[in-house]
Amino acid sequence: MRKNLFLASACIVLIALGCSKEQETIQPQNYLKSGSVYLTFDDGPTGNSTTLVSKLKTAGVTATFFIWGNRISGNLTGFNAIKSAGYSIQNHSYTHSHMTSWSYAQVYNDLNQCQTAIKNQGCPAPKKLRLPYLENNATITSAASALGLAIVQPTVDSKDWNGASTSAIISAVSNLQSGGNPLMHDGYTTTDNAISQIVTNLKNKGFSFAKY
Ligand code: ZN
């Protein structure tokens, strides 16, 4: 009886080993990249925001919007579309100025005005900053840091701001690597029309989508 039990146990162990070995050889994930990418859009809200949000919703992905603070009051419909979709709303300064010649106080006040404008719409205080024109120096870095803002530099440039075609935008942004984010903007039909294929390409590579 004891011997039979031993044999039965041994069989179960062998079957289990057989199963796990089979699972090891059938893992399509091995051929896919892992990790997340961040779809990021600068310069909104604009008259384009509702269209862009709708494209993102159809594609079923989340996103982050780096908001140009003094555009909020004139584009509340767009702002609310971004907010109610649950996308991340972050800081892109209030006046979108060239700040490298500014004093610490000037930089601090401009970035803080954007924080306030976003919080006044019932959103949490941003923790991330996209610099206008991506221009940085020690004064800007320290003002951002004092406001609890971490600077997010893009890892890929879609060139949508420079007249890139939809297919060129798709091609550039599909090169995102794990943890990366592209320079893209809220305001171009070319960008809006690229969303669906960008998402398909990145999903096919195995990436998921995160927001800041
Ligand atoms: Zn910008």
Image: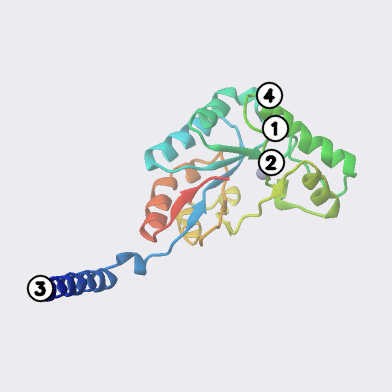
Residue drawn where x is 56% and y is 54% of the image: 181
Residue wearing tag 1: 69
* Residue at the spot 70% in from the left edge and 32% down from the top edge: 69
Can you see residue 63?
yes
Label 2 CB-ligand 1 distance < 8 A: yes
Answer above or below: position of 156 versus 112.
below
Q: What colour scheme was applied to this rendering of the protein? A: rainbow
The local secondary structure at tag 3 comes to helix
Instruction: Tell which tag, 3 or 1, sits nearer the viewer.
Output: 3
The residue singled out by tag 4 in the image is: 120
Name the image quarter holding the C terminus.
top right
Disc 3/disc 2 C-alpha distance (Å): 72 Å
Q: Which residue is disc 2 drawn over?
A: 92
Question: Quadrant of the image for the N terminus?
Answer: bottom left
Q: Label 4 to label 2, Cα distance in Å? A: 16 Å
11 or 118: nearer the viewer: 11
